Amino acid sequence: MGRAMHPTPATTIARRCERAVVTAYRELRLSGTDDLSAFRACAVLYRIHHPEASVAEARRLVAEWIDHHIVREGLGPTRGCDCA
């Protein structure tokens, strides 16, 4: 990845599943897991929170959340599921 992964304050992530995904991705990458493996693990994690979600939906949301919170270091709300 090659860039610092500054922690996003937990208070800026309202959804538990989104917070879990971002935290897991960040920790996996910091521990040396390659990007694709971390992404796939986070898609599985999302589906644990939301078993009704398709694999495609999980991958789309995880990609959006990683892009927003990790790549762009965004602090605002994101699109996603309706859970709290």
Image (cartoon, rainbow, N blue to C red):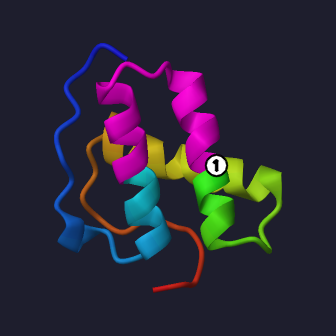
Q: Is residue 36 magenta?
A: yes
Q: For the view shown, which residue lies furthest in the top direction?
A: 2
Q: Total of numbered circles in the picture?
A: 1
- Vertical side of 15 occupied by 35: above or below: above
* Predominant secondary structure, magenta span: helix
Q: Nearer the viewer, residue 42 or 74?
A: 42
- Vertical side of 18 occupied by 45: above or below: above
- Image point (75%, 58%), residue name: 57
What amino acid does circle 1 point to? Ala
- Image point (42%, 41%), residue name: 25
Which residue is disc 1 drawn over? 43
Q: Using residue 6 as the reference point, say whether residue 22 is left or right of it.
A: right
x and y percentages locating residue 76 in the rendered image: 29, 64
Q: Nearer the viewer, residue 3 or 28?
A: 28
Q: Is residue 75 magenta?
A: no
Q: Using residue 32 as the reference point, say whether residue 18 is left or right of it.
A: right
x and y percentages locating residue 39 in the rendered image: 57, 36
Q: Nearer the viewer, residue 33 or 62?
A: 33
- Image point (69%, 56%), residue name: 58
- Vertical side of 14 occupied by 32: above or below: above
- Vertical side of 13 occupied by 83: above or below: below
Is residue 60 shown to the viewer in this render?
no
Q: Secondary structure at mark 1?
A: helix
Quarter of the image with the C terminus is: bottom left
Is residue 23 shown to the viewer in this render?
yes
Region rendered in magenta? 23-43
Quarter of the image with the N terminus is: top left
